[in-house]
Amino acid sequence: MTFARHNSNNLAHPSQLHRHCSRLRKAAAKTTGGVIKDVAVPGGCLELEVDFTADHPGLTLFRCHMQRHMDFEFTGCSTLSDKLIN
Ligand SMILES: [Cu+2]
């Protein structure tokens, strides 16, 4: 699966999709060599795309690692359903 994220403000956000191993596909409109990263930092007003294998059904946390950003709700859970995975 590909997870695409557009950072709509000018702050850097060290973001992580927990419970999955992510491979950075594209950052700031440039294709990468597919480096494996736990945390990627989209700079201000930039986009990134990561590929991951959706092999862990259930709640998955996506968050920014900056405490102040988490305090202002840059954190959330998504549910990967068994139907999506199989
Ligand atoms: Cu942040």
Image (cartoon, rainbow, N blue to C red):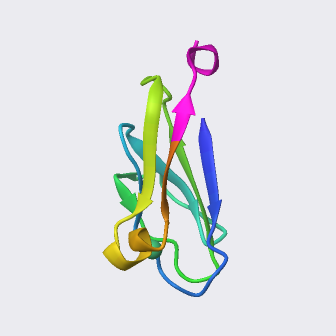
Residue 35's x, y, as percent? 40, 53
Above or below 57: residue 51: below
Q: Is residue 27 left or right of residue 21?
A: right
Front position in the image: 36 or 9: 9
Q: Quadrant of ligand 1?
A: bottom left
Q: Where does residue 30 sit, x and y in percent of width and height?
A: 62, 67
Which residue corresponds to the image point at 67% horizontal and 69% vertical from the top-left? 29
The residues colored magenta run: 78-86
- Where is residue 44 shown, x and y percent of the image? 57, 83
At which x and y percent is residue 6?
66, 67
Taking 74 as reference, is 8 above or below it?
Answer: below
| Image point (47%, 80%), residue name | 12
Q: Is residue 17 magenta?
A: no
Identity of the residue drawn at 61% across and 42% down = 2
Return the residue nearer the eye: 29 or 60: 60
User: How many marks on residues?
Assistant: 0
* Residue in the picture at 48% in, 55% down: 33
Indicate left or right for 48 with 13 as reference: right
Q: Is residue 36 above or below residue 41?
A: above
Residue at the farthest bottom position: 10
56 lies left or right of 3? left
Q: Is 83 covered by the magenta stretch?
A: yes
Pick the quarter of the image with the C terminus: top right
Rendered-image quadrant of the N terminus: top right
